[in-house]
Image (spheres, rainbow, N blue to C red):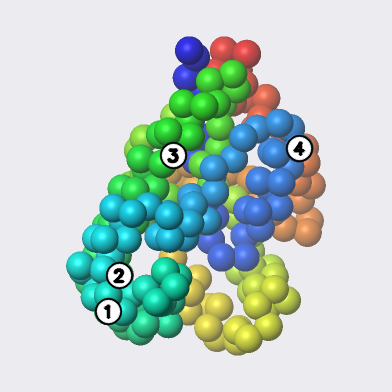
Amino acid sequence: MNKPRLVGITGGIGSGKSTVCKIFEVLGVPIYYADDRGKQLLLEDKTLVIKVKSEFGNESYTADGQLNRSYLADIVFSNPTELEKLNGLVHPAVAKDFALWVQSKGEHPYVLKEAALLYETTSYKSMDDTICVYASKKTRIKRVLLRDLQRTSKQVEQIISQQTSDGVRKKLSTYAIQNDSDSLLIPQVLKVHKAILQSAGH
């Protein structure tokens, strides 16, 4: 069974990495959405559910088994140590789930793992290549405000300032894709796609 090349893709809030992922999907590349899977696993992974309850209390889940988001948010967002604890439970579960998912993708030359916190969790170290999607701060703020109507530009700026900078992301990435209105996206994605296929021996 061939093992596909593992490629991580990340970008800050409003960088437009979802759009870039859609283009890769059109090219037939399987994509593992780590953040979405993390949310699913918090509901489906029995071991993870038990760990979360023992760490944060039974109130972490509602009576019908749903995640009590507001309760957990109150605990973790004001306290970096608590957030680290929660991530410390979720990330290993996601890593295990991702490894199983990869096993079912042996016929593909490479797969993408889309994660907001690729460099923050050091999960990028288990990737063969990484892609960073970036855009100017102005563009990113504009995109987020159009998408999340309840946010203010000050809040978006605050989120950007707390995330890994584009400079650091670019330095750590194998490939960088600029997703601004003045740069054509599809030719950049095709170029990266071709380069990864070559690295994968295709």
Disc 2 designates what residue?
A: 83
> Along the polypeptide, which appears first: circle 1 or circle 4?
4
Left or right position of 48 against 1: left
Instruction: Give the residue drawn at x 56%, y 65%.
Output: 13
Mark 1 is on which residue type? Asn
Disc nearer the start of the sequence (2/4): 4
Q: Secondary structure at mark 4?
A: helix
Residue behind mark 4:
26
User: What x and y, as percent, mark residue 116?
Assistant: 49, 56
Q: Nearer the viewer, residue 100 or 196?
A: 100
> Label 3 near label 4: C-beta < 8 Å?
no
Q: Give the amino acid at mark 2.
A: Leu
Q: Which quadrant of the rendered structure holds the C terminus?
A: top right
Three-letter code for the amino acid on which mark 4 is drawn:
Val
Q: Which mark is residue 79?
A: 1
Q: Is residue 129 visible?
A: no
* Separation of marks 4 and 3 at Cα, in angstroms: 21 Å
**Residue 5: image x %, image y %?**
50, 25
